[in-house]
Image (spheres, rainbow, N blue to C red):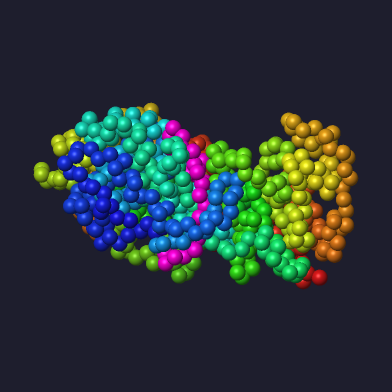
């Protein structure tokens, strides 16, 4: 079975870097591709699992190919198309292309060629071979919920913390974290971060044994504080305004020489402006939590796929984040918690019963 | 895999993905040696993995019909499931090592040749039984039975129905352990791959499949029951010559079912069969341990709902009562 985790130095010597693309540019392409998958998926009402699977395919694909050979937006479309089928939420190729076209500038869409559908079909076979038909991908979301169920403390605060962690996981898709760490580790780190930021201090948990020094010792081994902080910073870096030098390398494949305005903005801009998709204002923005009632730790719906976080303007990039709460605790993310059954596309089947290995 | 040979045509504004697709036919890293078997749904080759020091593998070639939207969802789901199963490394399941494709086949544009690469096991149960100099020892039969049922239970616990269990795709490793092979892609086969020219053995087919009604995991329990019986006798239990003859064989053994159990919406009427009385299994299998007899009898029940499940079988006294006397 293929192994999909890389050292940081492997991430610096990718096919793109060998092809003359700087690491900064590659990371930007990865982020833009991931964002594009998220936006396209959101617009098509695809579930978070499908979107995340598509993004993981995308990141893996570019560990074997250069962004110069394969323009990122068509690859992104193909990844989402394949993920839709694998996660049993299929969308027609032509519909994905239609949405893609609506989200991209004409110049960027030009990279899809004369027959976009045919290009995606051909690319599907290249993608499958590249990811070695390893189609089943696990994501941190399920682990977040699993871990949260074990933590003791104020239910409302816990819920708020889980929502925040959920958003961090969404955002982490724009980083290469899924190429560095298993979903369990990412879930622990981002829940740790959310706990710090939402002032939810975990003091006790179910299943605690004396040798545990932290709640995550129950779930993952050998996770150091350095590692957790490194992961958190990779996500937090997304929120720091990015300075794009004027002469920054343009994307390959004939895609925009002149970047549309949005590209230069930090991705933390509030959803309405950063996302080409209108935010559905009908959805409740405040989560009603019955006091004392057993909270349901069900996944929030699609909204969290956006960067719902305001920037942390006053935040120093390093330890202060952890040692002290930020000056302004961000408002709870706008994640409606479904009160009824979970969304159908999300849990279309019961979790498989685990067979002991 | 390197993309160094892929032209990075900076000058061309567009690079068609077609230009590089030919580079990724990684089926070429396997050298076909000889045909191991031709099944209803594809051909299995013995092959050499040229990248892994010539390791011998079993390579199953499956042709997949492409749809308007590329590779069918069912095929992708099943491959994903096979990969997932592989992660469990179950001792009674043959290991899937690799999946690759050979690009579009020449004959038909709208077809993709898939290669499922499995670990190679030299011997299957069919040849094992044929080569056996005499009856198998009771403890051998029991451990092989347990292996088969463990593998079936594992598949069922992952919602996979094998549907074609037979001695040919039960492999006997050098340590005597039995492994199930040739599972998965059942839906793919069903939709795209039905090859009428190839004769599929009917001997292990349960009545519900022969009657064309809906079926479930019970089919594998029936087939496993036939195989378990064969471990004792070393000859097929129900060697029918045709679909209808197979049903006659079945009813001659277990009796024609009561009218109430005959499924609805079946084109074959119950009166096409004489009122065969059930045979006494003790006469069919002389000298067999009563526990073994009881287990097989409870697996070969007409109504799938009344058949034991694979898990029930594993908990049967035949396996739990020690020692076997």
Residue B173 relative to residue A50: left or right: right
Residue nearer the viewer, B64 or B147: B64
Residue B233 x, y percent position in the rendering: 78, 61
For the point 10% across and 43% down, which residue is it?
Answer: A246
Residue B141 x, y percent position in the rendering: 73, 65
Residue A304 x, y percent position in the rendering: 36, 40
Q: Examine the rendered structure and indicate whether residue B6 appears above or below residue B48.
A: above
For the point 84% across and 37% down, which residue is it?
Answer: B273
Residue A2 x, y percent position in the rendering: 41, 58
Residue B53 on the magenta span: yes
Using the rendered image of the protein, determine whether residue A176 is visible from the camera's viewpoint.
no
For the point 59% across and 40% down, which residue is it?
Answer: B195
Q: Quarter of the image holding residue B140?
A: bottom right
Residue A142 relative to residue A28: left or right: right
Using the rendered image of the protein, determine whether residue B124 is visible from the camera's viewpoint.
yes
Q: Hey, which residue is sitting farthest left in the picture? A: A246
> Quadrant of the image for the C terminus of chain A?
bottom right
The image shows a total of numbered marks equal to: 0
Q: Examine the rendered structure and indicate whether residue A342 appears above or below residue B224.
A: above
Q: Which residues are magenta?
A: B52-78
Q: Quarter of the image holding residue B40?
A: top right
Q: Quarter of the image holding residue B262?
A: top right
Residue A121 relative to residue A256: left or right: right
For the point 22% across and 30% down, which residue is it?
Answer: A106
Residue nearer the viewer, A219 or B298: B298
């Amino acid at each position: 079975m293929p192994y999909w985790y890389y050292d940081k130095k492997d991430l610096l010597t990718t096919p793109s870097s060998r092809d003359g693309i700087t690491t900064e540019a590659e990371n930007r392409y990865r982020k833009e591709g991931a964002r594009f998958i998220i936006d396209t998926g959101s617009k098509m009402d695809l579930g978070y699992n499908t979107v995340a699977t598509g993004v993981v395919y995308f990141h893996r694909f570019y560990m074997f190919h250069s962004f110069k050979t394969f323009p990122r937006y068509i690859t992104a479309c193909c990844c989402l198309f394949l993920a839709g089928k694998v996660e049993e939420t299929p969308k027609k190729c032509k519909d994905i292309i239609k949405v893609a076209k609506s989200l991209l500038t004409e110049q960027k869409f030009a990279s899809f060629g004369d027959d976009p559908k045919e290009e995606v079909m051909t690319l599907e076979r290249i993608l499958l071979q590249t990811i070695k038909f390893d189609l089943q991908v696990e994501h941190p979301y399920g682990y977040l919920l699993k871990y949260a169920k074990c933590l003791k403390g104020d239910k409302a605060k816990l819920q708020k913390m889980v929502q925040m962690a959920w958003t961090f996981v969404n955002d982490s898709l724009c980083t290469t974290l899924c190429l560095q760490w298993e979903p369990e580790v990412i879930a622990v780190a981002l829940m740790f971060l959310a706990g710090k930021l939402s002032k939810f201090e975990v003091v006790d948990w179910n299943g605690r044994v004396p040798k545990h020094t932290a709640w995550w010792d129950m779930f993952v081994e050998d996770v150091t504080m350095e590692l957790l902080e490194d992961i958190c910073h990779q996500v937090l870096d997304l929120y720091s305004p990015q300075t794009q030098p004027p002469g920054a390398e343009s994307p390959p494949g004939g895609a925009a020489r002149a970047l549309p305005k949005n590209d230069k903005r930090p991705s933390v801009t509030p959803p309405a402006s950063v996302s080409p998709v209108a935010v559905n204002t009908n959805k409740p923005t405040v989560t009603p939590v019955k006091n004392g009632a057993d909270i349901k730790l069900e996944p929030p719906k699609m909204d969290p796929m956006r960067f719902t976080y305001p920037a942390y303007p006053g935040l120093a990039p390093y330890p202060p984040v952890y040692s002290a709460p930020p000056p302004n605790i961000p408002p709870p993310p706008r994640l409606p918690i479904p009160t009824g059954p979970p969304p159908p596309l999300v849990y279309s089947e019961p979790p498989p019963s685990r067979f002991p290995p | 895999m390197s993309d160094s040979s892929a032209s990075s045509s900076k000058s061309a504004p567009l690079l068609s993905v077609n230009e590089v697709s030919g580079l990724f036919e990684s089926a070429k890293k396997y050298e076909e040696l000889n045909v191991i078997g031709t099944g209803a749904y594809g051909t299995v080759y013995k092959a050499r993995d040229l990248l892994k020091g010539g390791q011998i593998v079993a390579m199953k070639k499956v042709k997949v019909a492409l749809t308007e939207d590329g590779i069918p969802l069912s095929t992708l789901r099943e491959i994903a499931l096979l990969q997932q199963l592989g992660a469990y490394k179950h001792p009674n399941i043959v290991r899937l090592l690799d999946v690759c494709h050979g690009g579009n086949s020449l004959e038909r544009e709208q077809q993709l040749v898939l290669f499922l690469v499995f670990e190679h096991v030299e011997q299957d149960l069919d040849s094992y039984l044929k080569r056996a100099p005499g009856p198998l020892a009771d403890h051998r039969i029991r451990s092989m039975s347990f292996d088969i049922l463990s593998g079936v239970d594992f598949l069922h616990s992952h919602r996979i129905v094998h549907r074609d269990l037979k001695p040919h795709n039960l492999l006997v490793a050098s340590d005597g352990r039995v492994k199930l092979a040739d599972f998965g892609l059942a839906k793919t086969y069903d939709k795209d791959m039905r090859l009428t020219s190839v004769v599929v053995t009917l001997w292990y087919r349960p009545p519900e499949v022969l009657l064309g009604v809906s079926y479930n995991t019970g089919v594998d329990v029936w087939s496993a029951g036939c195989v378990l019986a064969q471990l004792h006798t070393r000859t097929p239990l129900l060697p029918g010559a045709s679909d209808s003859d197979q049903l006659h064989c079945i009813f001659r053994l277990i009796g024609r079912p009561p009218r109430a159990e005959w499924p609805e919406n079946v084109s074959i009427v119950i009166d096409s069969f004489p009122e065969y009385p059930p045979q006494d299994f003790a006469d069919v299998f002389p000298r067999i341990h009563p526990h073994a007899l009881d287990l097989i009898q409870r697996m070969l029940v007409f109504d799938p709902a009344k058949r034991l499940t694979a898990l029930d079988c594993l908990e049967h006294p035949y396996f739990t009562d020690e020692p076997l006397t």
